Amino acid sequence: MRCRQATRLISDAHERELALDELLGLRVHLLICPHCRQFQRNCHQLSQMMRTFKQLENQEK
Ligand SMILES: [Zn+2]
């Protein structure tokens, strides 16, 4: 798997369930590629932040 595919899957994972072979490919890639690990960390923080914003919005209602 290439970094392009890996980063694509990482962002897809927030919108849909990945297939098992996609997940496995991604796992293996993340083991060998620090760049994509960093990307995943950033994506994760971003989605956590979005979730927090949504929760705050809901609380205000
Ligand atoms: Zn990579």
Image (tube, helix red, strand yellow):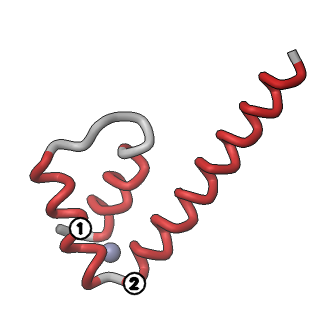
Residue at far left of view? 21
Q: How many marks?
A: 2
Q: Residues within 10 Å of mark 2 (few under 14, many from 20)?
A: few
Mark number displayed over residue 9:
none
Name the quadrant of the C terminus.
top right
Q: Residues within 10 Å of mark 1 (few under 14, many from 20)?
A: some
User: Along the line of sight, which residue is nearer the eye, 54 or 37?
Assistant: 54
Q: Residue at x 42, y 80 (%)?
A: 35
Q: In the figure, is residue 12 to the left or right of 41?
A: left
Q: Where's residue 46, x and y in %?
A: 63, 53
Closer to the eye: label 2 or 1: 1
Q: Which residue is mark 2?
A: 34
Please determine whether, in this image, residue 61 is positioned above or below residue 45: above
Q: In the figure, is residue 39 to the left or right of 19?
A: right
Q: Where's residue 36, x and y in %?
A: 39, 73
Q: Which residue is mark 1?
A: 27
Q: Where's residue 21, x and y in %?
A: 10, 52
Mark nearer the N terminus (2 vs 1): 1
Q: Residue at x 72, y 31 (%)?
A: 54
Q: In the figure, is residue 20 to the left or right of 47?
A: left
* Element type at mark 2: helix
Ligand 1 positioned in quadrant: bottom left
* Element type at mark 1: helix
